[in-house]
Image (cartoon, grey):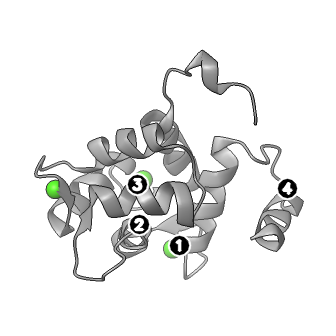
Amino acid sequence: MKAFIFLACVLPLVWCNSEPMKAAVLFDKVDTDKNDYLDQTELDAIFLLFDVDANGQVTKAEFEDDWVNKFSLGNIKEADALFARADQTHDGILTKNDLQAIYTFFDMDNDQKVSLNEFLTQWGRVTLLPVDPVDTHVG
Ligand SMILES: [Ca+2]
Ligand SMILES: [Ca+2]
Ligand SMILES: [Ca+2]
């Protein structure tokens, strides 16, 4: 994991350890054909990362646990906020039915491709939360 973060930080990105850096790393990780755009399959892969038992459904518990513990993407509040946004069908699980709507959400100009810019913009919108003042101290 340390090597992974180091690699991310030597990329020409100024936001190491910031939310956009994490999002950019995720983007690069799932852009499997390296064409700098995410198609539906590639974007779906982000959410399928969280499908621990590979049954095509991501429960809130799976999502929270992986977000916080496995991928260290943030705290449980961020996980909850993102899950709530991602669960477009409001049934408490993420499935294919949600992924289509998620793709539409990310594809701001409707050209059927999600650019890094679109991804960072929308990722910021779903993960930016009011910061709890007691959480600002590391420790
Ligand atoms: Ca791609
Ligand atoms: Ca759902
Ligand atoms: Ca687009």
Taking the spot 43% from the left edge, 73% from the top edge, the residue there is 49
For disc 2, the neighbor class at 10 Å (few under 14, some 14 to 19, many from 20) is many
- Kind of element beneath mark 4: loop
Q: CA distance from mark 3 to mark 4?
A: 30 Å
In front of the other: 82 or 123: 82
Q: Is residue 115 visible?
A: no
Residue that label 3 marks? 64
Q: Is residue 55 visible?
A: yes
- Kind of element beneath mark 3: helix
Taking the spot 36% from the left edge, 56% from the top edge, the residue there is 111
- Kind of element beneath mark 2: helix
**Of callouts 1 and 2, which one flags the residue occurring earlier in the amino acid sequence?**
1
Residue that label 1 marks? 30
Q: Is residue 18 above or below residue 47?
A: above
In front of the other: 139 or 6: 139
Q: CA distance from mark 2 to mark 3?
A: 19 Å
**Of callouts 2 and 4, which one flags the residue occurring earlier in the amino acid sequence?**
4
Residue that label 2 marks? 43
